[in-house]
Image (tube, helix red, strand yellow):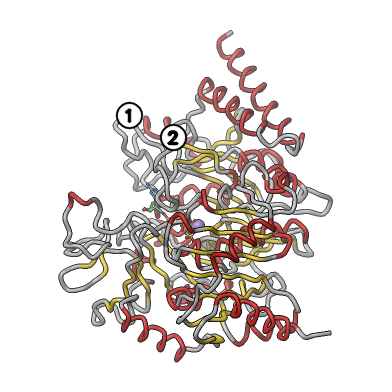
């Protein structure tokens, strides 16, 4: 039997004979390798040095202006059978997709270096972790993968021991939006990506492996791969509850994962521990609880809006040794984006800043930084066993209707809450921004198989011996008649998390409504907030008519996953619709 490393070498040779690189570099993940790559990229203009006094070890990358976000219309999930991809994915026949991609890869690395990146998603010694190897011709991708994953020698050793790894092939190509495809072959645990250097399209360990391929693998193996942050909330008694929360792209995961408690809470001894800001893998442990790891080692976070008032932890994290992509710069060469004090002089495209050209930093400009630099980074993030999850939270950008917080009555109701999630689109993907769309579990762009099967997989965790987390839905993005956010958000969101923890411990009775359990007015600690009683009423209102229309829309949406829609979900939706009608009738009688 050939060893895994022989199989890996054979694959590398095969790729090299197709792509024709001038040389091959096996990445060891060392500091010296990283420094050499940075020097090379500074020399060829891929990176620009930022102010090394204020921002030591920080660099700026300006991408091709047409390559700034994920491209969902060019992202495919290539199952052998079209039905298995579901209506939530673009599908292509695997043989056709391979042929199409191999034609693009033919000779594409001529004169360039082919990098082999062995990586491990998750703590190197965790049974929940999984490995992969990415082949790329982009030094920018190598540098980012070193920050975002456990990359190099240790991963290679684990790959040799385990005998399996996800194969990812990437080339920047000519960055032509007409010749750009992100292809996934879930049954083959293979990814082929061509024509983009942008994070989610090119750092194949992230969305491609840790969500699209992993979600499919997780279904086979009885675990979950989710677009969720993981945060630990330590109360003044020293107990820590871990919460996993799924919000769509650019809807607040990084911010919630790093929140700084409001002043009164800090004084009382509340602490927040960051375990993950984007991806969560979880699996039932021997005690029946769900245990979660963050498969990543770094943050690829949204820059605009990050400030001392919104997310001081993120700001401290990116003060050194950070790669910024598509931000603006100040006169003294510091990175700048909307939300920071000071003035930009050069915009994200390198032009003199002119407000007529739009924002100075691209709305999807990002920072890549090691998670270890985060002041609230949890030592538990390295725990091979993962952290036990007390609550799962779903949420999105909903300017109306959805209350600040509600709790599901049980697991199936919680799965419905996740499946029914909607949110306004953001700059994280190309296309229109601010359009309300359904984004079940924040996984619409990332679920590697049919959503009907995915909902059934979620429901399957409700079985004998399971000690499941409570499930909640939040909305930080309610707006008033003038279009202003009703809820202050950011650090103040801890007030809502505190209520969730009280519910988990059985310390808050809540109010039962047709749509779920809401906090009683006096159950939310609002000390120090300038919220008026009218605003609080609006945030916690259940608008029966609005909800009846919402339930109908959810029903239509669920219908699109027939014949694979689990009957239990359909029943949940119908029960709530009936209950709403009953209560409306009783109220008007
Ligand atoms: P991805 O990395 O794309 O998956 O995004 P994310 O979910 O981690 O989003 P992130 O935390 O970076 O937030 C994106 C935007 O939402 C930023 O512009 C934030 O300022 C804004 N935001 C985050 N939390 C809140 C909040 O509680 N209230 C309001 N109003 N805005 C928020
Ligand atoms: C997202 O879009 O949800 C991100 C950024 O977290 S990317 O990794 O590029 O997908
Ligand atoms: Mn994300």
Secondary structure at numbered mark 2: helix
**Residue drawn at x 80%, y 85% as measured from the top left:** 2
Tag 1 or tag 2, which sits nearer the N-term? Answer: 1
The x, y position of residue 271, in whole percent, is 47, 64
* Nearer to the camera, 580 or 209: 209
| Mark in the foreground, 2 or 1 | 1
Image location (x, y in percent) of residue 211? 61, 59
How many other residues sit within 10 Å of disc 1, few (<14), some (14-19) or many (≥20)? few
Residue 422 or 453: which is nearer the viewer? 453
Q: Is residue 263 visible?
A: no
Q: Position of residue 334 (x, y in %)?
A: 23, 72
Let me know if residue 459 appears in the view: yes
Q: Is mark 1 within 8 Å of ligand 1?
A: no
Q: Quadrant of residue 32?
A: bottom left
Which residue lies under the disc numbered 2? 539
Residue 78 appears left or right of 261: right
Q: Which mark is residue 127?
A: none
| Quarter occupied by the C terminus | top right
Q: Nearer the viewer, residue 325 or 138?
A: 138
Image coordinates of residue 45 in percent, x first then y, are 30, 77
Q: Are circles 2 and 1 on residues that touch, CB within 8 Å? A: no
How far apart are labels 2 and 1 at the CA level?
Answer: 13 Å
Kindly indicate the quadrant of the structure image that contains residue 425: top left
Q: Which residue is mark 1?
A: 481
| Residue at the farthest top position | 589
Q: How dense is the environment of label 2, judged by Cα within 10 Å: few (below 14), some, or many (20 and up)?
A: many
Q: Left or right: 581 with respect to 222?
A: left
Badge 1 element = loop
């Amino acid at each position: 039997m050939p060893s895994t490393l022989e199989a890996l070498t054979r694959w590398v040779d095969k790729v090299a004979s197709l792509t024709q690189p001038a040389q091959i570099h096996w990445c060891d993940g060392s500091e010296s390798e990283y420094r050499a790559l940075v020097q090379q990229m500074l020399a060829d203009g891929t990176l620009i040095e930022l102010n090394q006094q204020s921002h030591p070890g920080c660099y700026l990358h300006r991408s091709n202006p047409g390559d700034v976000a994920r491209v969902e219309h060019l992202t495919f999930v290539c199952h052998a059978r079209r039905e298995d991809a579901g209506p939530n994915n673009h599908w292509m026949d695997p043989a056709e997709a391979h042929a199409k991609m191999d034609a693009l890869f033919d000779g594409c690395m001529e004169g360039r270096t082919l990098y082999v990146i062995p990586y491990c998603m998750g703590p190197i010694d965790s049974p929940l972790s999984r490995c992969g190897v990415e082949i790329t011709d982009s030094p920018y991708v190598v540098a980012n993968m070193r920050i975002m994953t456990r990359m190099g020698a240790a991963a290679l050793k684990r790959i040799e021991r385990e005998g399996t790894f996800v194969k990812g092939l990437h080339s920047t190509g000519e960055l032509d939006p007409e010749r750009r495809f992100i292809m996934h072959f879930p049954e083959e645990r293979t990814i082929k990506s061509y024509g983009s250097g942008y994070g989610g399209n090119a750092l194949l360990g992230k969305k491609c492996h840790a969500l699209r391929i992993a979600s499919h693998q997780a279904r086979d193996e009885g675990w979950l791969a989710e677009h969720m942050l993981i945060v630990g909330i330590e109360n003044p008694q020293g107990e820590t509850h871990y919460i996993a929360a799924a919000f769509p792209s650019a809807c607040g995961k990084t911010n919630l994962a790093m929140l700084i408690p409001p002043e009164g809470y800090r004084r009382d001894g509340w602490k927040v521990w960051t375990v993950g800001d984007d991806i969560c893998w979880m699996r039932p442990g021997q005690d029946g609880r769900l245990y979660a790891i963050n498969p990543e080692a770094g943050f690829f976070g949204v820059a605009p809006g990050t400030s001392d008032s919104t997310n001081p932890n993120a700001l401290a994290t990116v003060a050194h040794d950070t790669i910024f992509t598509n931000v603006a710069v100040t006169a003294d060469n510091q990175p700048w984006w909307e939300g920071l004090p000071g003035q930009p002089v050069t915009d994200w495209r390198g032009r003199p800043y002119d407000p007529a050209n739009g924002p100075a930093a691209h709305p999807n400009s990002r920072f890549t930084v090691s998670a270890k630099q985060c002041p609230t980074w949890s030592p538990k993030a390295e725990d091979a066993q993962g952290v036990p999850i007390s609550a799962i939270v779903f949420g999105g950008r909903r300017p109306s209707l959805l209350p600040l917080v509600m709790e599901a009555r049980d697991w199936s109701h919680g799965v419905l809450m996740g499946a029914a999630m909607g949110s306004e689109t953001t700059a994280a993907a190309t296309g229109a921004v601010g359009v309300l769309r359904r984004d079940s579990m924040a996984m619409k762009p990332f679920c590697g198989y049919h959503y009907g099967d995915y909902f059934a997989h979620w429901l399957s965790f409700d079985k004998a011996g399971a000690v499941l987390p409570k499930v909640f839905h939040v909305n930080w993005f309610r707006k008033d008649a003038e279009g202003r956010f009703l809820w202050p958000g950011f650090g103040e969101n801890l007030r809502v998390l505190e209520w969730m923890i009280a519910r988990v411990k059985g310390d808050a009775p809540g109010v039962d409504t047709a749509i779920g359990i809401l906090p009683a007015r006096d159950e939310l600690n609002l000390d120090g907030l300038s919220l008026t009683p009218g605003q609080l009423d609006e945030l916690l209102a259940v608008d029966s008519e609005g909800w009846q229309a919402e339930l109908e829309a959810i029903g239509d949406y669920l219908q699109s996953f027939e014949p694979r829609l689990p009957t239990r979900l359909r029943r949940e939706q119908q029960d709530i619709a009936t209950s709403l009608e009953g209560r409306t009738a009783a109220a008007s009688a």
